[in-house]
Image (cartoon, helix red, strand yellow):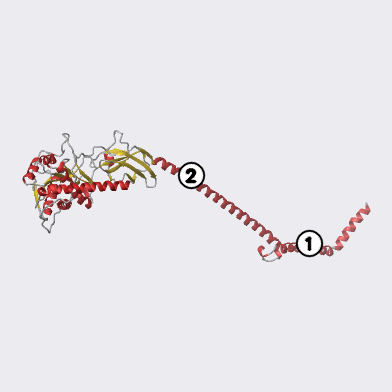
Amino acid sequence: MEEVGTNTSKMKNYIRLSTILIIYLIIAFPVMAKEKVVVVIDPGHGGYSDDASAYGAIYKDELCEKDINLATALTIKEELEQYNNVEVYLTRDTDAVLTLDERVDFAYRMGADVLISCHYNASESHLFYGSEIFTSAFGSCYTTGHALATCIMDQWVNDGQASKGIKTRIGKTGEDYYGIIRHGFEVGLPVIIIEHGYLDNHIDYERLGMPEDWERMGRLDATGIAEYYGLSRERVWDNVIPTVITEMPDGRVDPDTTPPGSVSMNIIDCNIETSEVTYEITAREYESKLMYYGIALGDPEDEDADPSDYADLILWEEGCNKVTGTYSVPTGYRGPITARVYNNYELYTDSETQQIDFASLLEERAALLEQAAQEARMKAEERKQAAERRAEAARIEAEQKKEREKVGDFFFFMGGNEKEETIDPATRKKRLYLEIIALVVFIVVFISLIIIRHRREIIKYIRNIEGNDLDT
Ligand SMILES: [Zn+2]
């Protein structure tokens, strides 16, 4: 059902857009159809002045934004001049000081169709990365600026930049916030500020930190501008007509001023092996888009909470309202953890702070390991005792065997050197009896021989005893 609804509304939008385009072309064609478009490129900042704005952002004490802007702007001009049907001017091609009014006035005098102010970005927190383009919030300055910005942003995104979007910014007076855009609107000149990325953030710096990067960005910008106007390197058109149309807004196009909603974080798993938390973060953003999220070990309600704790902001996957991932914590961490979700207007909402306790998990694991070790020790002890008992039994057995052998040797003095093992118990018993009988026979024969040998003395002795008896 939802799909059908979306398709219907898409179709309606399409029809409406086509109608507007046709009416727009019929009315505006004689006015806007030009043989040549005039594009003025403005390298932001420039010159030497007491005013820090002359330099733009200073990066790593060696890169000065005004120089980088000029390098990119020179490349845009050189590249764009390869196309037909276009005239390109620079507000400055040297390191000169120019006011914002002077830049707009120059473009106006040149009959510019558009003024493109070329910049590189930086943020106070150094957390942000990605490219963004600012346009007027009003009327045709908005529609031209937005449509042109779309073509340039497409080039950047294809090159790998994260898009922070095409935006408006409103000042306190309700007009465009940026002076150059405001002055442009006053004279009916569409002005866009192209912020190529953040040189104070390592993610963008890796892509944009070198002179060849500034030139690459310049070529991408020129390609985007040429795409917008449908320019060709080979062919000369009779008329130049923009290829992208942005719908005319009803009134002022306001930026998003509210942070993301419904931000929550679930801790799905705490892995004590890797010391990693697996999380799931959900958030909603209806007015703009979810841009980044960060995780910090801390409670943002704390007075000491430091926004740089959310270093290394992760890109929020476009079109999703839920992300999952893992976050490394110090071993044994016990304490608060919070997620922070940003929209592309750098407004954020923190999730409710969760408590994670790796210390207790480690203690539990240590206790389990100790229990297992205890059981293993007990089993080893049992095995040892069993082995000792077997050894003792074997020793006793060996001793008994020795004893038996001794007895055997004593009785088997006639039996030669036969080993006990080779004689069965029955034979052994029989032999024992035979040996005893032989011994008894030997003793009887021996005594008999003595008696026979000394028979006279014995008889005499006996008679003597008898005679003595008679005398008394
Ligand atoms: Zn700047």
Dot 2 alpha-carbon crowd within 10 angstroms: few under 14, some 14 to 19, many 20 or more: few
Label 1 belongs to which residue? 440
Q: Are marks 1 and 2 in contact (CB under 8 Å)?
A: no
Dot 1 alpha-carbon crowd within 10 angstroms: few under 14, some 14 to 19, many 20 or more: few
Q: What's the residue at 29%, 48% (across, down)?
A: 7
Q: Is residue 302 placed above or below 411 in the rendered structure? A: above
x%, y% of residue 312? 27, 44
Estimate the spatial distance between the alpha carbons at disc 1 and disc 2, rounded to whole Å: 73 Å
Residue found at the very far top of the displayed protein: 303
The amino acid type found where label 1 is placed reads Val
Q: What's the residue at 22%, 52% (across, down)?
A: 158
Secondary structure of the residue carrying tag 2 is helix
Q: What's the residue at 34%, 37% (across, down)?
A: 353
Secondary structure of the residue carrying tag 1 is helix
Instruction: Please identify the quarter of the rendering in which residue 176 is found.
Output: top left
Q: How many marks?
A: 2
* Residue 371 circle label: 2
The amino acid type found where label 2 is placed reads Gln
x%, y% of residue 235? 12, 58
x%, y% of residue 65? 15, 45
Along the viewing direction, whichever of 17 and 389 lies nearer the viewer: 17
Q: Earlier in the sequence, mark 1 or mark 2?
A: 2
| Some atom of ligand 1 lies within 8 Å of the CB belonging to the residue at label 1 | no
| Residue 70 appears anywhere in the view | no
Along the viewing direction, whichever of 73 and 175 lies nearer the viewer: 175
Q: What's the residue at 20%, 49% (across, down)?
A: 18
- Left or right of residue 443, residue 205 in this image: left
Along the viewing direction, whichever of 244 and 405 lies nearer the viewer: 244
| Residue 280 appears anywhere in the view | yes
* Residue 258 circle label: none
- Left or right of residue 144, residue 308 in this image: right
x%, y% of residue 278? 36, 45
